[in-house]
Image: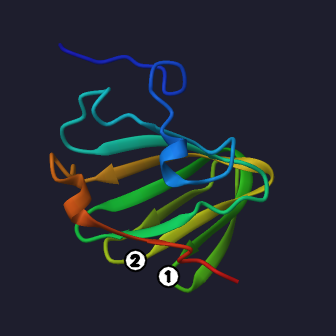
Amino acid sequence: MAFTHKNLKRDLEDVGSNFDGPPGLQFHLATDALELEQSGLCHQRIPPGVRFPYGHTHKTQEEVYVVVRGSGRVKVDDEILEVSEWDAVRVPPGSWRGYEGGPDGLELLVIGAPSLGDDRRGDVEGARDWWSD
């Protein structure tokens, strides 16, 4: 049986700086590294008091956000949810989403399905500063 083993923080490049966010924003894309065929996975860390700079929506992919450390808020369309460790939030295709770190930051695993294949950007629409107060 074939399998793939990676450490999400140590083995994967941190592309957090690609999002023009603050220092300490981490974003580790695991889909290709783990050779996922039916789903997608990434790890994110949002520093304390920081809102991820972009909101986004998917045409076909649903996502589940699992808080593995810290706390914060998640916005889905017009609803804002308080989240803490081991909370999971499912977001269906077509809903806008964004998130921000609480006092200790917010660390997430994001699981998406179905796989977006080679045209990942074709399924997503993003907007900078989508969530504004």
Q: What residue would you read off at disc 2?
A: 95
Judge left or right: residue 90 versus residue 75.
Answer: left
What percent of the width, then of the height, locates residue 116? 20, 52
| Helix, strand or loop for disc 1 | loop
What percent of the width, then of the height, locates residue 122? 20, 62
Residue appearing at x 48%, y 20% in the figure: 7
Residue appearing at x 48%, y 39% in the figure: 15
CA neighbours of label 1 inside 10 A, class few (<14), some (14 to 19), many (20+): some
CA neighbours of label 2 inside 10 A, class few (<14), some (14 to 19), many (20+): some
Q: What is the number of callouts on the image? A: 2
Give the distance between the C-alpha atoms of the residues marked 1 and 2, in whole angstroms. 6 Å
Query: Which of these two is toward me, 88 or 95?
Result: 95
Query: Which of these two is toward me, 114 or 127?
Result: 127
Against 37, residue 98 (above or below) is below
Residue appearing at x 24%, y 71% in the figure: 59
Q: What residue would you read off at disc 1?
A: 77
Q: Amino acid at mark 1?
A: Asp
